[in-house]
Amino acid sequence: MIVVAAILAAGRGTRFGSDKTTEILGAKPVWRWSLDAFLEHPDVDSVLLICSPDRVEYMATQVGERVRVIAGGATRQASSRAAVEASPNADIILIHDAARPFVTQRIISETVSAIERKGAAGVAVKVIDTIKEVGPNTIRTLNRDELIAMQTPQGARREILDRAHKGAKADVTDEMSLFEGIGVHPEIVEGDPNNFKITTPADLERARAALQYAESRTGIGYDIHPFSDDPARDLFLGGIHFPDHRGLEGHSDADVLLHAACDALLGAAGLGDIGEHFPNTDPEWKGCRSTVFLAKCAELVRVAGWSIVNLDVTVIAETPKIMERAPEIRSVIASGLKIDDSRVSVKATTNERLGAIGRGEGIAAMAIATIRGGQPANEPS
């Protein structure tokens, strides 16, 4: 089942007064929040970023290889259709407005599951205010128990979404309206009040205020392994093979850098340490690559409701030379965590010939991970 997420960022921001998705929110542009959320989700195989034609080339320089940037249309519906046309091999397509920065992993998971069951789905919240229908000479109160406010993502199996676009007789503002036009009844997924859309400058201020109350945590990891006397042991650091160098002794591949990273992530989320999840007494992990541990730890952190903000790692070794291969290590770690390379830092130092590390008896590593609650906390009343 191939799931493609399309982030719509081609709007002109008429009500906002400018392109709201480029506004800075918590040190990154608004569009980046939703893009990162879908990139980090284990059910999403690839992500499309839909922007205005004049920004395609620039936006392509701002995202990693896992994101494809394509031109959108003059309307939201045209941009949605462009996403469908650009995803011929997708089984499921999710359409999400870039102006909704706080979509959660729970919402994405439940939307995908709903589409698998029903063929189409959309996210919505119940209406809590009293709604009036106002005419030239009348005011009528609507039954709010029968009303919902739509959010995104909305999506469907590709063939349904394709048929809905081809059958559209007028321009509509969301995919649910397209489904209505062809008689498809989507499943409604429970949304979240924090998954609101930034439409006006006041909405942007609301988003910035909400972030002030989002909980952040930091975890520290440390690991050390001695060099092995086994000439057949390979040396792996940060998931990268260093040939022609003594390997480290350990139950798995003894990748101290990734072990420290795992402990930092688990510690930040209060999930114990690497030894609890991958004990060295379990034959399942004998000789296992630590990239497996890293990916599993990242998933544990997200299931617990956290988003990975960044990871900073330092290797302490006399040899080998680490920094020559730091870009490769960053890429491997970022891929395992499903975050952008820019959120991973790799450093190295020696122990100035002091102690066991200084005598070349082994390698140590330290890591610091920062995570944030998967969504902003509700503003205090």
Image (cartoon, rainbow, N blue to C red):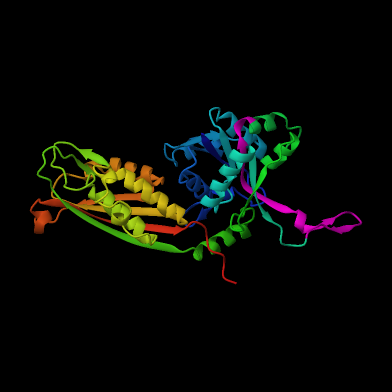
Residue occupying the point 49% across, 63% down = 214
Residue occupying the point 37% across, 42% down = 335
Horizontal side of 289 relative to 57 (left or right) equals left
- Can you give x and y, in whole percent of width and height, for residue 172 in the image? 72, 39
Residue 266, compared with residue 56, is above or below; it is below
| Magenta residue check for 151 | yes
Horizontal side of 301 relative to 330 (left or right) equals right
Residue 208, compared with residue 68, is above or below; it is below
> Which residue reaches farthest right?
137
> Which residue reaches farthest bottom?
381
The image quadrant where one finds the C terminus is: bottom right
- Can you give x and y, in whole percent of width and height, for residue 256 in the image? 23, 50
Find the magenta span and give its range. Answer: 131-159
- Can you give x and y, in whole percent of width and height, for residue 132 in the image? 81, 58
Residue occupying the point 41% across, 54% down = 301
The image quarter in which residue 370 lies: bottom left
Horizontal side of 67 relative to 112 (left or right) equals left
The image quarter in which residue 142 lies: bottom right
Of residues 87 and 211, the one nearer the viewer is 87
Residue occupying the point 51% across, 34% down = 2
